[in-house]
Image (tube, coloured by chain):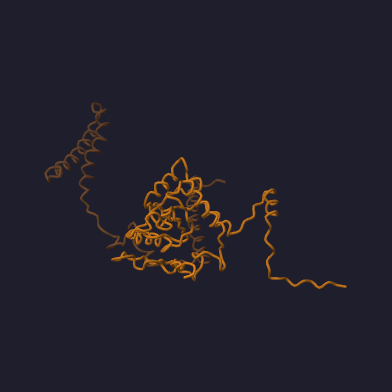
């Protein structure tokens, strides 16, 4: 009895498991993919924009100095131009008057770019949330990747946030529906710059990025 | 191999051209196959620290500082040549002495010109 030969299938061979990779590494063979190589290179050269807003910027500066040494993570190159930067660290209170400038800088950074909201003010307005002139969170206009709570967060917290961002970059897909926006042609990369109007920013938020939370009614109302 | 002693310069030049061209080609292929370019009006705008730009980025600077450059040249270059001139002053042949005097005269003429135009006055 003759077994019929299987027709050649289009499915690729299964990817080597982690144990097989470890065994290959012991033999001196490194396996990688374009995706891993790309993400590895990018995650270790995240260049921040040289951009400080308030007291959190002091902690950011401290993180870049010798004691905390952000250079260990490849991010010591604070670029003075958004054209060369990968990361926008919104370090401090964003007033409504400053918001158009922040959003314009974010727009002028080339993709792939990431945003860290550092401190309570950049996340939600923080202690100045009730103020008439403070933006209640930069995520109303910019897609924020990492939130770092604190008032201000210590340099270690910023380094932790940077490590979390590196984790995120390493997990990004290079193609397919889960790819980040900069690798997809159907996702726009424009973020409208708001106007500093007479009473508030016009528009007060970017509806593509942020929606106001639904009002929570008290129980029994 | 008995090649020209400067043949390695041709090799250097070839590598110096091929390396950046290869990198640019890889970047081009990356954009072609993976990352679609997405230019935008704000993105391509002039960078002025986040503020909305006014006017053109190609502006003319005032060229007033060329006078200071010229005066600096007169004094600085003169000193540069006068020091070696002074050390061998007594042992110079006539030709070298004449050449040096012509050089000093040329620079002195420039100084006289700047003086008469009033460029030495502190404004």
Residue B109: x, y in percent?
A: 16, 42
Q: Quadrant of residue B77?
A: top left
Chain ID for orange: A
Q: Determine whether A79 is above or below B58 in the image.
A: above
Q: Left or right of A2: which side holds A190?
A: left
Residue drawn where x is 41% and y is 46% of the image: A61
Q: Determine whether B26 is above or below A78 in the image.
A: below
Q: In which quarter of the image is residue A134?
A: bottom left
User: Which residue appears farthest toward the top when viewing the image?
Assistant: B90
Residue drawn where x is 55% and y is 60% of the image: A172
Q: Which of B32 and B87 is in front in this view?
A: B32
Q: Nearer the viewer, residue A151 or A163?
A: A151
Numbered label tally: 0
Q: Which of B95 and A13 is in front in this view?
A: A13
User: Which residue appears farthest toward the front when viewing the image?
Assistant: A220
Residue B29: x, y in percent?
A: 52, 64
Residue B95: x, y in percent?
A: 23, 34
Q: Quadrant of residue B91?
A: top left
User: Which residue appears farthest toward the right when viewing the image?
Assistant: A1
Q: In which quarter of the image is the N terminus of chain A?
A: bottom right
Q: Left or right of B112: which side holds B41?
A: right
Q: Which of B14 and A13 is in front in this view?
A: A13
Chain ID for brown: B
Q: Left or right of A181: which side holds A2?
A: right
Q: Left or right of A169: which side holds A6?
A: right
């Amino acid at each position: 009895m003759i077994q019929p030969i299987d027709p050649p299938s289009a499915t690729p061979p299964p990817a080597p498991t982690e144990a097989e990779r470890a065994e290959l590494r012991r033999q001196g063979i490194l396996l990688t993919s374009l995706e891993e190589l790309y993400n590895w290179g990018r995650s270790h050269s995240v260049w921040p924009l040289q951009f400080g807003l308030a007291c959190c910027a002091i902690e950011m500066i401290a993180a870049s100095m010798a004691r905390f040494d952000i250079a260990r993570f490849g991010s010591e190159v604070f670029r003075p131009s958004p054209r060369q930067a990968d990361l926008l660290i919104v370090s401090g209170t964003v007033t409504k008057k400053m918001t158009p400038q922040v959003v314009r800088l974010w727009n002028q950074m080339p993709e792939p770019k990431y945003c860290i909201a550092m401190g309570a003010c950049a996340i939600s307005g923080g202690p100045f949330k009730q103020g008439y002139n403070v933006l209640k969170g930069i995520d109303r206009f910019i897609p924020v990747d990492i939130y770092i709570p604190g008032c201000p967060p210590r340099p270690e917290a910023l380094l932790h946030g940077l490590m979390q961002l590196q984790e995120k970059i390493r997990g990004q897909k290079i193609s397919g529906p889960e790819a980040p926006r900069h690798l997809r042609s159907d996702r726009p990369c424009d973020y409208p710059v708001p106007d500093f109007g007479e009473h508030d920013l016009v528009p007060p938020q970017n509806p593509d990025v942020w929606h106001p939370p639904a009002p929570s009614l008290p129980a029994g109302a | 191999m008995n090649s020209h002693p400067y043949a390695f310069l041709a090799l250097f030049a070839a590598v110096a051209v091929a390396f950046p061209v290869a990198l640019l080609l890889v970047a081009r292929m990356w954009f072609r196959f993976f990352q679609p370019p997405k230019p935008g009006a704000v993105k391509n705008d002039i960078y002025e620290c986040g503020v909305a730009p006014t006017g053109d980025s190609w502006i003319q600077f005032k060229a007033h500082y060329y006078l200071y450059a010229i005066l600096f040249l007169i004094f600085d270059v003169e000193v540069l040549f006068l020091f070696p001139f002074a050390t061998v002053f007594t042992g110079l042949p006539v030709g070298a002495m004449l050449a040096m005097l012509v050089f000093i005269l040329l620079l002195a003429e420039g100084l006289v010109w700047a003086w008469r135009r009033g460029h030495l006055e502190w404004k």
